[in-house]
């Protein structure tokens, strides 16, 4: 029973870490493919949630079963889980603040634009 | 099995850090550069945690929590500078 | 292959971050727009963080990171907003 739980936890953790690596690379390619500031918010979100929050939870699931690390593996697990929570709360707030500042300072144009009710000069 | 997989994933994160750094160097506007610095830091966090497992030294994990907190401070500085033109100090 | 020489990955990461930090310092010196120069300096300090981490000095990372990512861009942005943004000839 306990061995089954250990196996499930390790496989799930490694799967989340592998998925995070692939998603981070996809986000990095997306930064080069998108042409505009507001469109680049989308690969940043991929990098943040799939590439940082889920791998840290995967590290938590992996390290609580690795008995090679000694007693302090609980420290790695707790610290990475707290970091996942911090990134999950703070990264969307930061990117929203940057987008608001760029839109107010009129440094980037809204490029595929149907309507911009805040400032109609930036449209198109 | 686990340790080789951790090294390969670290190589993926290294490649994404290099691509983000290129965008951070040549981004057309200031906002692109700030977004790229954010992404560099979030990739660095996962890289550091993975190597903390790989080296089997748990004290190296302490670094990542201030890293996640201070980059948010950089976001807020740049947003306030772009929005108001000064930091109000 | 990777399993036979695992320390090569660590040296590869250190070499890549060193080269990218040299490019960031060159761009920070040559840039006319001072806000962009502050951002290049932030990129350089983030890459130095990876270097200090792999040189097994997490205490130096804990001291260097708030100063280089938090304090110096904040103080420099206040200073730039009090004076002028673009450097003259």
Image: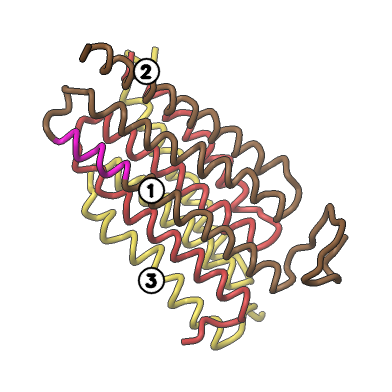
Chain colours: A brown, B red, C yellow
Return the chain for callout 3: C
Badge 3 vs badge 1, beta-carbon distance below 8 Å: no
Q: Position of residue B30 (x, y in %)?
A: 64, 63
Above or below: residue B63 compared with residue B18: below
Question: Residue A68 got which mark?
Answer: none
The circle on residue A85 is 1
Residue B69 sits in which quadrant? bottom left
Give the residue at the far front of this rendering. Answer: A1
| Percent x, y of residue A41 | 64, 51
Q: Which mark is residue A11?
A: 2
How crowded pointer 2 is (Cα within 10 Å; few <14, some 14-19, many 20+) is rated as: some
SS at badge 3: helix
User: Which SS class for mark 2?
Assistant: helix
Q: Which residues are magenta?
A: A72-81
Q: Nearer the viewer, mark 2 or mark 3?
A: 2
> Which SS class for mark 1?
helix
Label 3: which residue?
C71
């Amino acid at each position: 029973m306990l061995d089954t739980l250990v196996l499930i936890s390790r496989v799930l953790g490694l799967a989340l870490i592998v998925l995070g690596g692939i998603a981070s690379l996809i986000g990095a390619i997306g930064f080069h493919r998108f042409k505009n500031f507001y469109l680049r918010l989308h690969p940043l979100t991929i990098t943040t949630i799939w590439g940082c929050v889920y791998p840290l939870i995967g590290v938590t699931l992996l390290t609580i079963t690795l008995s090679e690390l000694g007693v302090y593996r609980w420290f790695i697990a707790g610290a990475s889980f707290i970091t996942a929570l911090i990134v999950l709360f703070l990264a969307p707030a930061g990117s929203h603040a940057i987008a608001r500042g760029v839109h107010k300072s009129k440094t980037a144009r809204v490029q595929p634009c149907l309507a911009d009710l805040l400032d109609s000069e930036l449209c198109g | 099995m686990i340790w080789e997989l951790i090294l390969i994933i670290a190589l993926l994160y290294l490649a994404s850090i290099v691509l983000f750094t290129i965008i951070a160097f040549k981004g057309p506007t200031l906002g692109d550069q700030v977004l790229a610095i954010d992404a560099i830091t979030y990739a660095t966090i996962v890289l550091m945690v993975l190597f903390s497992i790989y080296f089997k030294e748990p004290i190296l994990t302490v670094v990542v929590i201030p890293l996640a907190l201070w980059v948010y401070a950089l976001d807020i500085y740049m947003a306030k500078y772009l929005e108001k033109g000064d930091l109000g100090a | 292959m990777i399993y036979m020489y695992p320390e090569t990955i660590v040296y590869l990461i250190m070499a890549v971050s060193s080269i990218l930090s040299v490019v960031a310092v060159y761009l920070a010196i040559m840039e006319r727009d001072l806000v962009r120069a502050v951002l290049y300096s932030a990129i350089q300090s983030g890459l130095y963080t990876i270097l200090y981490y792999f040189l097994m000095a997490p205490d130096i990372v804990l001291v260097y990171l708030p100063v280089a990512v938090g304090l110096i861009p904040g103080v420099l942005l206040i200073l730039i907003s009090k004076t002028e943004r673009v450097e003259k000839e």
